[in-house]
Amino acid sequence: MTTHDDGLFAAMAGRGVSRRDFLKFSSAMALALALPATFAPRIAAAVTAAPRLPLVWLRGLGCGGDGEAFLRSAKPTTAELLLDLLSVDYAAALMAPSGTAAVRSLADAIARGGYIAVVEGAVPTGDGGVACAVGGRAFGDVAREVCARALATIAVGSCAFDGGVAAASGGSTRATGVAGLVPAGRLVSLPGCPVNSENLAATVVHYLTFKQMPITDGRNRPLFAYGGLVHNQCERRAHFEFGEFVVSWGDEAAQKGWCLYKMGCKGPETYASCPTTQYAQGTSWPVRAGHGCISCTMPGFWDAASPFYSRLPSPLPFAPTVSADQVGQLLVGGVAGATTVHGVASYVRVRRTGAAERRAAARRGQESGSLRPEPARLADGLPAVSRAASAGEPPAPVTEAANEASGEPG
Ligand code: SF4
């Protein structure tokens, strides 16, 4: 254990976090970052040795659910560990100061710079951004200033990603995400409603460990969390393959945990790590709880994925005219077809083997002057030695004729 460990663990011990808990956290972070488990010690060493980065957490137009998700994870909380790793300079929902004192704290943090900015909530742009203000200023103006001085900005939740519910059709605030306010190359977006706090912790841990933000896709979403389809990682996928679907809430199929595609699940078109990372300390996620994915990590999901309980036109993006019923029928039909082909091939082989056996027996009978009894039909498909054993005979010596009958090379 390093001296850095001692210092950090003194702080952690004060929060009731043990060395074992911290190592479990490091392993979980390696897993969340899609790294081999062997990276856990490196992560633990890097994180404990890293200086505590300042953090500025801004809250814009939204329900506050992302901050709640972050703070309400189970013990030892991701939040506890993360707050030990970071020095919170400003977070309206967490800090003791309020009013002008809080605004002064924010101004001081901006002046110092060199912090990680976490932005939660959308940026209203209609009517001069009057729908959300911080210290009497439009939230967009404050966010632009904060993000310009940040080492990196992490947009948490769907609202900070692209406006979320406030940007849905019918809205009057002309809300957007923060992408337009952040200097190029310094934004990581973690959409979701709410954000998965494990992914937030993993993003910070990646920065502390590798001194850079994780690789992202074209929408600034890190590939470790948004590189795979929900559908491909889903625990109900086998039921999809075999055409086993829930068709009404609470039906027998729902109780058996069958696929929710026909109830509107958008998993086949959604990129997220929910099935593997899960929520509530890895205990569950929407599909496990019995509700289909609503695609909340995808752009404009309130409009694009609505109505949430209508099935997607096709579960196969490469074959848009194929329906879920056809997938099940095709796959089940394919399995049945393969089974039939295999059965026919086996039957032909058995028949040919039996004929060869009878010809060999006839030859042996002609040689010995007597015909051997027909072997039992159930034993027809077995190798020559096993057939003889099943008929109560001692194993016959392996002869050229027996090799011919069994189809094996002599
Ligand atoms: S459609 Fe939804 S419930 Fe069914 S396998 Fe795909 S993600 Fe899972």
Image: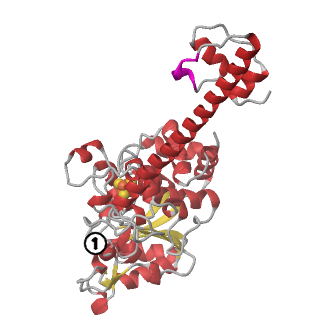
Residue 353 to residue 163: above or below: above
Residue 348 to residue 381: above or below: below
Which quadrant of the figure has residue 392?
Answer: top right
**In-image side of 391 versus 408 (left or right):** left
**In-image side of 97 versus 9 (left or right):** left
Residue topped by disc 1: 306
Which quadrant of the figure has residue 273?
Answer: bottom left
Residue beneath the point at 61% across and 12% down: 389
Residue type highlighted by circle 1: Ser
Residue 409 image point, x, y percent: 78, 30
Which sits in the foreground, 90 or 285?
285
| Label 1: which secondary element | loop
> Where's ligand 1: which quadrant?
bottom left
Span shown in magenta:
374-380
Residue beneath the point at 29% across and 69% down: 98
The structure's colour scheme is secondary structure
Question: Which quadrant does the N terminus fall into?
Answer: top right
Q: Is residue 70 visible?
A: no
Question: Which quadrant does the C terminus fall into?
Answer: top right
Instruction: Based on the picture, tell me whether residue 190 belongs to the magenta stretch.
Output: no
Residue 268 image point, x, y percent: 41, 62
Residue beneath the point at 27% across and 92% down: 127
Disc 1 residue lies near ligand 1 with CB under 8 A? no
Residue 4 image point, x, y percent: 61, 47
